[in-house]
Amino acid sequence: MKNIGFLSFGHWNPHPQSGTRSASDVLLQSIDLAVAAEELGADGAYFRVHHFAQQLSSPFPLLAAIGTKTSKIEIGTGVIDMRYENPFYMVEDAGAADLISGGRLQLGISRGSPEQVIDGWRHFGYQPAPGEDESGSDMARRHTAVFLDLLEGKGFAQPSPRPMFPNPPGLLRLEPHSAGLRERIWWGAASTETCIWTAKKGMNLQSSTLVVNESGKPFHEQQADQIRAYKAAWQEAGHTRTPRVSVSRSIFALTSDQDRAYFGRQQDNDQFGQIDNFRAVFGRSYAAEPDKLIEQLREDTAIAEADTLLLTVPNQLGVAYNAHVIESILKHVAPGLGWR
């Protein structure tokens, strides 16, 4: 295991017991947690993106703000729903945030998850291509193809003969351009077919705690099979760089009475269910004393196949407690998994 970071879903709730009672709370605490995680030695700070929900949504102001407050930690998303995105404007936003952070963005994108509203992307002005029987997933991939192409930084727009400012020669590209960002785009995949498609497109792979139930095997084995298929497809595609793969897990080292009160009774079995019209398997949570956690995680074949582990954090419990959760893993568990 080369890299360990955290993944926050950025929930807020006005309930008196919530540590994040407003959007302002969760945004400012997300910055503080990223700073704390960097000080603890974590490798990444990642954030989920949801629309029409009391959760984090527009990621780039947050990513840029974290970029100004930190200096080493990777800053990313897991994932941005491409059904909602204008790829042209997104390239400008991503380029700016990446330059502010000194080239530390790791952008996870995908088709997205089940929504809070019906076809929410229509409210953003997007719809499947007419007459082509295009699905929302197809539209997300169409937006992604444009986004990836624009990230290459090639000129495509004819300059005006009477520009306000002098232009460089040739066709113009979107600015600001951040060289290298194209290689730091990840796709969130939940099926073997999508993992293979991701490899062919030259994107890194993000695999979450939910995958399509394709074989009935335990969750981590199905996920590991998908990762192996991705790596084989990457090699077959002839890409020259080494790809990256992340998995996310809910992992809690029980080192205090507070830990045991919060997580001592966590569900420790995979769960099978139906989501978005497909059969899915949901990965278990891990909560145990550090020595037992190390033994359990060594048996997780998907973690062994990945190079990056993202710890899903209970952000509504506040910065101090989540920093404790991260520190407990980094100090007591991660070394036993070969980290650092």
Image: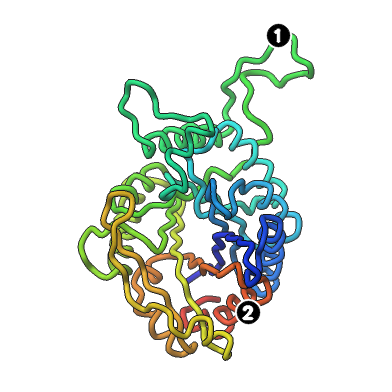
Give the structural element (helix, strand or loop) at label 2.
helix
- First reached walking from the N terminus: tag 1 or tag 2: 1
* Residue position for label 2: 324
Quick one: which residue is furthest to the top in this view? 161
Determine the CA span between mark 1 and mark 2.
59 Å
> Residue 116: x percent and y percent?
47, 48
Give the structural element (helix, strand or loop) at label 1.
loop
* Residue position for label 1: 161
Q: Is residue 184 left or right of residue 206?
A: right
The answer to whether any part of residue 260 appears in the image is yes
Front in this rendered view, residue 7 or 17 = 17
Q: Residue at x 61, y 33 (%)?
A: 89
**Depicted 212 relative to depicted 80: above or below:** below
In front: label 1 or label 2: 2
How busy is the neighbourhood of tag 1: few (under 14 within 10 Å), some, or many (20 plus)? Answer: few
How busy is the neighbourhood of tag 2: few (under 14 within 10 Å), some, or many (20 plus)? Answer: some
> Residue 40: x percent and y percent?
66, 75
> Residue 191: x percent and y percent?
31, 53
Colour basis: rainbow
**Three-letter code for the amino acid on which mark 2 is drawn:** His
**Depicted 247 relative to depicted 136: above or below:** below
Quadrant assignment, res 95: top right
**Three-letter code for the amino acid on which mark 1 is drawn:** Pro
